[in-house]
Image (tube, rainbow, N blue to C red):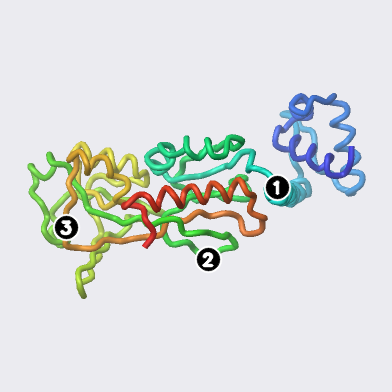
Amino acid sequence: MDRLDKIKLFLRVAEAGSFSKAARQLAMAQSTASKQIAELEQRLGVQLLRRTTRGLAITAAGQHYYDGAIRLIDELESLDEAVSEQERSPAGMVRVTSPPGFAASYLLPKLMSFTTRYPKLAIDFTVSQNLANLVEERVDVAIRMGNLEDSDLRFRQVGTATAIVVASADYLEQHGEPTTPADLERHACIASMYLGKPRPWLFVRGQERVSIEPRGSIRSDDVELAKAATKVGLGIAYAASWLFKDELASGTVRQLLTDYRCNAVPISAVWAGDRALPGRTSAFIDFVAEVCAAEPALRPQ
């Protein structure tokens, strides 16, 4: 077993927390796995793993080695794939994180055409509001909505998410319709939370610029929950227009305050900046950009 294979074995053992489990996954004898890790530790001159009554525990040196090794293997695999895919159709797994609702509403309906175009590709979706650590969680590309903080990540803007104000017909029948942002002070507003605080609602009309802090009995960091609360008449929501596409078309909810422009933020495909971008990931980003360009609620601005 060469040096690189030993590093890969160490990563598998550390992740499995067991020599026997890792050995079964790799179809090798447990004694062989133990021997190879011992040789790796001897070459490094440090203990990477220690046995405990509960199994294996990674040492501080082992954790440092693991963090560096996982980046090294990811970079090497990405480089191999990027070079190889120049000469063949993209293949393999694309690991994607996406905000709730977006992939199901917009990407999945068009995904068959993508997989038909690239039959050797598979997509692993993780749905989350949280900003994933792309390197640690081994994510190939994240779909993010909003202005990106300065970082070492690279990105491509694939679309724009424009906010609108909506409420159900039942809510409006009971409480009336606001005609100005100031009227919202008298209504139940469903707040979208970020880092423990409600996101402000921004309105622009000509030179007028108004920011409202939403107040109401319902608030959540889950856009799908906020959508459900709006549909059952619990309040007024300020959310991306793409989230309510079907409800607006069916009349389940109505758009309010249409004389005002609301906040618009970029939709970005984000990937780790220290990796060569594999052809499979590039192809998926192109697909997301095509989907956004074809949807009025998502087109880049």
**In front: label 1 or label 3:** 1
Residue 263 position (above or below residue 168): below
Residue 118 position (above or below residue 187): above
Q: Is residue 273 left or right of residue 29?
A: left
Q: What is the spatial separation of the Cα atoms under label 1 and label 2, in whole angstroms?
A: 34 Å
Q: Position of residue 201 (x, y in %)?
A: 27, 59
**In front: label 1 or label 2:** 1
Q: Are marks 1 and 3 in contact (CB under 8 Å)?
A: no
User: What residue does disc 1 label?
Assistant: 87
Looking at the rendered structure, the kind of residue marked 2 is Asp
In what element is the residue under mark 2?
loop
In what element is the residue under mark 1?
loop
Q: Residue at x 37, y 47 (%)?
A: 221
Q: Earlier in the sequence, mark 3 or mark 2?
A: 2
Quadrant in which residue 245 is drawn: top left
Quadrant in which residue 250 is drawn: top left
Residue 207 position (above or below residue 269): below
**In front: label 3 or label 2:** 3
Which of the numbered marks, if any, corresponds to residue 257?
3
Q: Position of residue 263 (x, y in %)?
A: 30, 61
Q: Are marks 3 and 2 in contact (CB under 8 Å)?
A: no
Which of the numbered marks, if any, corresponds to residue 150?
2
